[in-house]
């Protein structure tokens, strides 16, 4: 190694030593680094200790888990007896079906978990489910000596099954058991249902022997218009010997404490219902209620608490029936429920009093008769209108004649009004005298119209609830039970809506034309004239969302009325009416007892008014007797 090499290595060594000395940490920095390393060591030691502790706990838990489970099973065994073994199991579904319905029954709780109506669809063409297992519950509660037995917590065992029937059992292994049996007929919407209780007489709590039945359903939407469906969605129930009661049909009452036996409870929708019936009636003091839901796919939450009487019998059987089907009047009326006066047809909303009678005894029989021969519902409504208007023709004729006579007398009535100014007593007295001499009754035009009102309002109830119209098309209307929109506006007009229903528009225009023609016949003027034009405009907004079958009926009714009046006008001569009025004036006037009393009352009122006027002029009040 030469001298230059030695010098080079020496310089490199000196540089490395100098750099090491220059970059070496100070004592303070060394102390800080040591503190950091000590902290990391402590954290790592704590982590290891925690992991070891967790491992010990897990090992301990694994070692005592069998003991905890055994204690829990022992407690359930003490409270529920042998029934506790059925708290564990595998969920299964048994399906029963006929032409009309498909019923799914879950082995957990042995309850109906869902029902599909095979022949019908929802408005969106999907399967029509009355309810499903997610939005419904059905169970019994039996008060035992040490606990309560709630049937939907247990897995029931299938003990008998055929093509149309299944029996599921919950047993304690010591001779006590409960059976639930479901049986479908070949073709209808009824499901025969039976609950059997065996060997429970010594287990049931003496203070609470009755079996508590709890049924809840969140009813799903089936139709296009939620607002109308909500209005017809509510629970109903029937007490023996009484008419069915509806709860919240007007939206005012949402709960009822039922003081009396109950024959059936129904959860009603616009066109379908789910009903539970008992041949021997459920015991007293039940509860029925409903509540609103925020889910747009659902309507309302239905709830009922009712009771089955249990008298500690060794064997007790409860015969019941389920109905899952349409709100069709004839179908419900003819149901073989085992209850003579079940009155389930009253689930169909037909109106109260005389309006319901008109629908039951006139409209529905005629409608069903036409339905047997004609398949098109729009044509049936047309023929139904013609039949009703033909039956009402004598009333229309009488109303027309009375209106024409009043028009002839109008100039004289106007003279009387001008003569007496604001003195209404004298105007009424002279008007009555004029009517009497002319042989005209001002009520004769109103009475025929009043007699037609029950038909008008009966139809208002019938068509929006007529199951026969559901999803039946006519002309441009795809469904006569819904509105017939020809244009969706895309925005909402207050008092009208967000669409244009053509049948409603046609009805309104025809009503306005009819009002104008009627005003020309009657000669009405002033405020009454404009009220007649206002009412059709109001109904344009009211009926815009209603069933197109209803507005189609009103339109056809108006057109038939035009035809009737045209025919009547051809056979009624105003000159002959003038002559009849003139002849009537020549005859002596015979006062009826009612007319005499009315005239006396008017004279007394006029006399009293004159006395008050005189007293006011003299500054003295009337003399007291």
Image: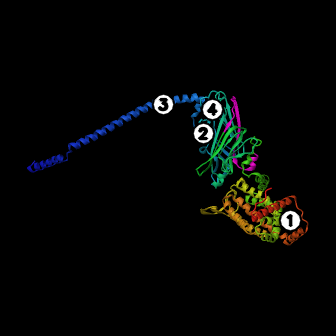
Mark yes or no: residue 567 visible: no
Look at the image and say whether residue 359 sits in the magenta stretch.
no
Q: Which mark is residue 143?
A: 4
Q: Which residue is mark 1?
A: 436
Q: Which residue is mark 2?
A: 92
Task: Say whether disc 1 or disc 3 marks the residue closer to the N-terminus.
Answer: 3
Q: What x and y, as percent, mark residue 529?
A: 73, 67
- Foreground: 10 or 153? 153
Q: Which mark is residue 321?
A: none
**In which image quadrant can residue 407 be found?**
bottom right
Which mark is in front, 1 or 4? 1
Task: Say whether disc 1 or disc 4 marks the residue closer to the N-terminus.
Answer: 4
Q: Secondary structure at mark 2?
A: loop
Look at the image and say whether residue 316 sits in the magenta stretch.
yes
- Disc 3 to disc 2, C-alpha distance: 29 Å
- Disc 2 to disc 4, C-alpha distance: 27 Å
Q: What x and y, as percent, mark residue 474?
A: 70, 60
Magenta stretch, residue numbers: 306-334
């Amino acid at each position: 190694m030469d001298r230059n090499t030695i010098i080079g290595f020496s310089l490199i060594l000196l540089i490395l030593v100098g750099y090491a000395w220059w970059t070496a940490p100070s004592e303070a920095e060394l102390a800080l680094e040591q503190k950091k390393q000590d902290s990391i060591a402590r954290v790592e030691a704590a982590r290891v200790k925690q992991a070891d502790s967790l491992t010990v706990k897990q090992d301990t838990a694994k070692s005592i888990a069998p003991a905890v489970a055994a204690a829990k099973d022992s407690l359930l065994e003490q409270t529920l007896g042998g029934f506790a073994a059925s708290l564990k199991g595998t969920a299964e579904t048994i399906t029963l079906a006929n032409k009309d319905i498909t019923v799914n029954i879950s082995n957990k709780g042995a309850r109906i978990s869902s029902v599909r109506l095979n022949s019908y669809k929802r408005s969106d063409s999907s399967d029509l489910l009355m309810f499903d297992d997610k939005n419904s519950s059905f169970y019994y509660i039996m008060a035992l000596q040490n606990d309560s037995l709630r049937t939907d917590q247990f897995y029931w065992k299938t003990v008998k099954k055929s093509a149309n029937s299944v029996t599921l059992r919950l047993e304690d292994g010591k001779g006590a058991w409960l059976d639930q049996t479901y049986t479908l007929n070949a073709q209808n919407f009824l499901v025969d249902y039976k609950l059997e209780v065996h060997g429970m007489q010594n287990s049931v709590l003496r203070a609470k022997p009755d079996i508590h039945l709890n049924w809840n359903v969140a009813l799903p939407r089936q139709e296009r218009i939620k607002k109308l469906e909500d209005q017809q969605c509510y629970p109903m129930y029937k007490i023996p010997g009484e008419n069915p009661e509806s709860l919240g049909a007007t939206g005012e009452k949402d709960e009822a404490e039922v003081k009396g036996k109950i024959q059936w409870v129904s959860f009603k929708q616009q066109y379908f219902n789910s009903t539970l019936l008992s041949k021997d009636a459920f015991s007293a003091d039940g509860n029925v209620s409903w509540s609103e839901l925020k889910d747009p796919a659902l309507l309302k939450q239905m709830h009922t608490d009712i009771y089955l009487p249990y008298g500690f019998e060794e064997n007790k059987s409860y015969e019941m029936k389920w109905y899952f089907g349409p709100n069709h009047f004839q179908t419900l009326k003819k149901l073989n429920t085992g209850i003579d006066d079940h009155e389930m047809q009253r689930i169909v909303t037909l109106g109260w009093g005389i309006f319901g009678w008109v629908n039951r005894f006139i409209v529905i029989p005629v409608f069903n008769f036409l339905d047997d021969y004609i398949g098109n519902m729009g044509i049936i409504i047309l023929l139904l209108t013609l039949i009703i208007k033909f039956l009402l023709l004598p009333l229309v004729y009488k109303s027309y004649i009375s209106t024409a006579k009043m028009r002839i007398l109008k100039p004289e009535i106007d003279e009387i009004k001008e003569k007496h100014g604001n003195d209404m007593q004298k105007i009424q007295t002279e008007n009555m005298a004029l009517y009497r001499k002319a042989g005209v009754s001002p009520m004769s035009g109103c009475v025929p119209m009043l007699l037609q009102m029950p038909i008008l309002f009966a139809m208002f109830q019938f068509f929006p609830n007529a199951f026969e119209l559901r999803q039946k098309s006519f002309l441009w209307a795809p469904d006569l039970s819904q509105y017939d929109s020809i244009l969706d506006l895309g925005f909402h007009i207050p008092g009208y809506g967000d669409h244009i229903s053509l049948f409603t528009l046609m009805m309104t225009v025809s009503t306005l034309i009819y009002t104008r023609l009627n005003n020309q016949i009657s000669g009405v003027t002033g405020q009454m004239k404009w009220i007649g034009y206002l009412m059709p405009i109001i109904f344009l907004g009211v009926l815009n969302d209603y069933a197109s079958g209803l507005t189609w009926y009103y339109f056809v009714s108006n057109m038939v009325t035009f035809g009737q009046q045209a025919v009547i006008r051809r056979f009624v001569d105003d000159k002959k009416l003038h002559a009849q009025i003139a002849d009537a004036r020549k005859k002596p006037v015979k006062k009826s007892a009612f007319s005499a009393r009315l005239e006396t009352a008017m004279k007394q009122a006029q006399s009293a008014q004159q006395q008050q006027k005189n007293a006011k002029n003299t500054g003295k009040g009337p003399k007291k007797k």
